[in-house]
Amino acid sequence: MKVITSLLAILALSAVTSFAADGDAPKKAEGDKGKPKFSPEEMFAKLDTDKDGKISKAEFMASPGAKKDEAKAAERFGKMDKNSDGSLTKDEMTPKKKKDA
């Protein structure tokens, strides 16, 4: 009986530890293949490596996603850089919400 009680206690502790670790992890979108989903503000902070309040093309191109397909990343940077100044601001990085009619 003591063996069964000990096993149940160990299983309960491992389950609690597992849930605590999952709660600390970045959010994952449904259907995502294990990739964390970051808010636009979190993504901006990650990409702005020199912390000057804007993301240069070099910073953007150094991201893991850009390294997978550099041509596509360069095209995306160009579309996001609305004022064509060679850098992205938080406003340019944040998708605009459509207003309901």
Image (cartoon, grey):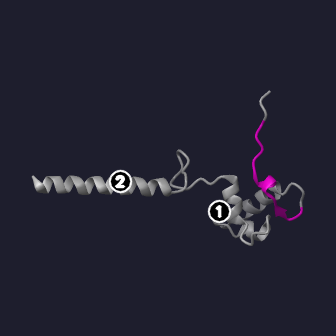
Instruction: From the viewer's perspective, tell me whether residue 82 is left or right of residue 44.
Output: right
- x then y, percent, for residue 1: 9, 52
Looking at this view, is 11 or 63 the one in front?
11
Nearer to us: label 2 or label 1: 2
Looking at this view, is 37 or 32 the one in front?
37
Question: Disc 2 and disc 1: Cα gap in Å?
Answer: 34 Å
Per the rendered image, the range of residues in magenta is 85-98
> Tag 2, which secondary structure?
helix
Residue 16 numbered mark, or none: 2
Q: Name the residue: 70% across, 65% down.
A: 47
Looking at this view, is 67 or 86 the one in front?
86
Q: Name the residue: 66% across, 58% down.
A: 42
- Tell whether position 88 is magenta: yes
The outermost residue toward the left is 1
- x then y, percent, for residue 95: 75, 47
> Tag 1, which secondary structure?
helix
Q: Name the residue: 25% across, 57% down.
A: 10
- Tell whether position 81 is magenta: no
Instruction: From the viewer's perspective, tell me whether residue 87 is left or right of residue 38.
Output: right
Residue 65 numbered mark, or none: 1
Q: What's the amino acid at mark 2?
A: Val
Q: What's the amino acid at mark 1?
A: Gly
